[in-house]
Image (spheres, helix red, strand yellow):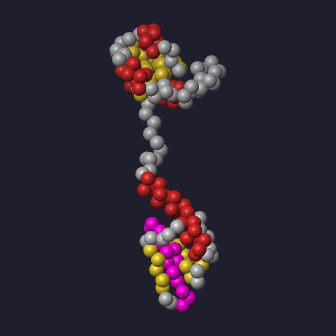
């Protein structure tokens, strides 16, 4: 039963409070979570069993607070930045810190350059003159001439081969 109460309390209110959906009285004043190291240190010093009043005196007013009553138990929650403090019958029981990760890992400089080259190459249109392509992409890593008729030339950039026939872009491929 206790696990069910905590799960209900967390799921109902944590997303609403973290998103700054108001105080339940029609207020929609949103405050952004603050990931302050000083706040984290102060929350870490709180003792289990502290009262709601003592915590509010120590930390100040929370961004949001919510109370859930179920099966004769009262679970009160205070929200400070990305922290959620849970009180069972008025006593501090749990401290939860929400950590948001980037949806995608940060790209290295090399990966950023590779993506930029990919975007530039994919923006090239068939039929473009070789001079225009060289002006946009710079000097190729390799330059290959195929002596067949019609004259074919291949410019290589990163993982791309750009094939020109009679000085006009005909095909691009990855190697």
Q: In which quarter of the image is residue 149?
A: bottom right
Q: Residue 122 lies in magenta, yes or no?
A: no
- Residue 39, position as x, y percentages in the image: 43, 22
**Quadrant of image for the N terminus:** top left
Q: Give the range drawn in magenta.
A: 149-163
Q: Quadrant of residue 44?
A: top left
When the figure is inspected, residue 30 is found, relative to residue 91, above or below; the finding is below
- Residue 122, position as x, y percentages in the image: 56, 65
Q: Which residue is drawn at 44% across and 74% down?
A: 142
Q: Which of 90 and 158 is in front in this view?
A: 158
Residue placed farthest to the right in the image? 26
- Residue 71, position as x, y percentages in the image: 45, 17
**Quadrant of image for the C terminus:** bottom left
Question: 124 left or right of 112?
Answer: right
Q: Residue at x 48, y 85 (%)?
A: 146
Task: Determine the main secondary structure of the stretch shown in magenta.
Answer: strand
Q: Residue at x 38, y 22 (%)?
A: 41
Q: Residue 162 lies in magenta, yes or no?
A: yes
Q: Nearer the viewer, residue 61 or 118?
A: 118
Residue 3 visible in this rendered orientation of the protein? yes
Residue 174 visible in this rendered orientation of the protein? no
When the figure is inspected, residue 98 is found, relative to residue 44, above or below; the finding is below
Q: Count the marks.
A: 0
Residue placed farthest to the bottom in the image? 149
Q: Which residue is drawn at 49% across and 75% down?
A: 155
- Residue 81, position as x, y percentages in the image: 48, 25
């Amino acid at each position: 039963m206790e696990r069910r109460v905590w799960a209900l309390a967390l799921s109902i209110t944590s997303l609403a409070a973290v998103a700054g959906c108001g105080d339940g009285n029609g207020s929609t004043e949103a405050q952004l979570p603050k990931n302050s190291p000083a706040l984290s240190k102060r929350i870490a010093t709180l003792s289990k069993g502290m009262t709601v009043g003592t915590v509010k005196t120590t930390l100040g007013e929370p961004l949001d607070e919510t109370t859930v009553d179920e099966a004769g138990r009262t679970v009160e929650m205070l929200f400070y930045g990305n922290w959620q403090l849970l009180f069972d019958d008025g006593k501090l029981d749990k401290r939860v810190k929400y950590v948001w990760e980037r949806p995608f890992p940060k790209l290295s400089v090399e990966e950023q350059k590779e993506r930029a080259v990919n975007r530039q190459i994919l923006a090239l249109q068939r039929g473009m003159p070789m001079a225009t392509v060289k002006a946009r992409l710079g000097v190729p890593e390799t330059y290959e001439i195929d002596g067949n008729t019609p004259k074919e030339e291949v410019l290589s950039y990163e993982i791309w081969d750009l094939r020109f026939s009679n000085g006009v872009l005909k095909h691009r491929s990855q190697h």
